[in-house]
Amino acid sequence: MNFIFLVITIIGVPVSIIGSLLHWTPTLMFIIFCITIIGLASFMGRATESLSIVAGPSIGGLLNATFGNAVELIISIFSLKAGLINVVMASITGSIIGNLLLVGGLSFLIGGLKYKRQQFNIFEARHNGGLLMFAIIVSFVFPLVFSTQLNSSEVRVLSAAISIIMIIIYLFALFFKLVTHRGVYKKNEAAAEEHEEPEWGLWKSVIILCVATIFVAYISENLVHTIKPVAESFGWSEIFIGVIIVAIVGNAAEHASAIMMAYKNRMGVTVEIAIGSTLQIAMFVAPILVLLSLAFTNFLPLVFPVTDLVAMVLSVLLTISITTDGDTNWFEGALLLASYVIMGLGFYLL
């Protein structure tokens, strides 16, 4: 799999630059940009993981919080700059339902076809369930309910305040998990998994992460400018592109890792990728974007469209109901996947 991402990156980066300079058609460039970003995201993820192991669990948690969803953050920043607020909101929605339903569903299905039952830490599942309830149902539903009685400046203040609180709680959650209660709820047989060897050394990881981030930033800026022409060419809405296409592109490498871990019966890692990445998007990336948007012409409020909000809430409730027992099978994976297809069809027809 890593070889495939390497080939994609080696070919995709120069082709993306050449295509941008020669002004190839937006549709062709959109495809090239998306494929190249998938390859670069793989290298960013591997470099971040190596740095996390070298730096230790506490600093590693902060590194993952910063760079774990860097691709989505970079794409969203350029979308904000271009005034594509709907695309940013849709990509946040797509990342959340994609991680929970698509990644979780595929992982449970593929792993469940090989193993009758797959188990993971029930205490972490319940802990993550509570965080999901806070991140989506409390922090996202609350602003929508109150926005009907507030003016735009008050909505701005409310969104910024909630964003700051969410970032603080997310950092507290990392501190709780990696410092004060590290290993408290771990099973004995999982202890061996804590001793990992980094794929790359410190400086190699730093160099790869910096170079990949620069290329992702360049390609993402150009990708954003192709969204409207592509939407018009295929008759897609910008919301559908954000919810499905951009969200999948930004998480593709991570998705592949989660599915591979499930196939190896390492469900703790799979669940951590699917739910942990969702929490990172909701409690770190989205609030950061809200605060950054204060510097742009178009402000990003934490007031999501009802369709987006309903999709996220239903995804959270379904995921919690399936994962809180610490046990999965292929049929539960099929349920999650079916839910994703239904929601994807709805956004396509929207």
Image (spheres, grey):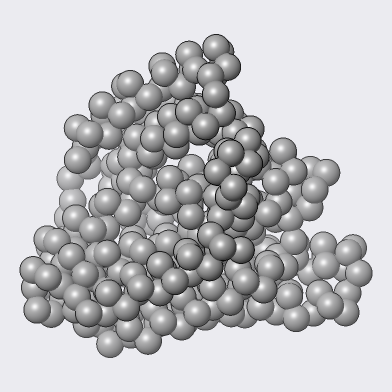
Q: Residue at x 79, y 79 (%)?
A: 146
**From the viewer's perspective, is residue 154 above or below residue 215?**
below
Q: Residue at x 40, y 62 (%)?
A: 99
Image position of 189 (left or right of 101): left
Image position of 297 (left or right of 42): right
Q: Residue at x 58, y 77 (%)?
A: 310
Is residue 335 in view from this perspective?
yes
Q: Residue at x 24, y 65 (%)?
A: 107
Q: Nearer the viewer, residue 275 or 194?
A: 275
Q: Position of residue 222 (x, y in %)?
A: 58, 28
Q: Nearer the viewer, residue 171 or 306?
A: 306
Q: Position of residue 287 (x, y in %)?
A: 64, 59
**From the viewer's perspective, is residue 239 above or below residue 148?**
above
Look at the image and tell me in which quarter the N terminus lies: top left
Look at the image and tell me in which quarter the C terminus lies: bottom right
Q: Position of residue 305 (x, y in %)?
A: 69, 68
Image position of 10 (left or right of 171): left
Could you say which quadrant of the image residue 90 lies in? bottom right
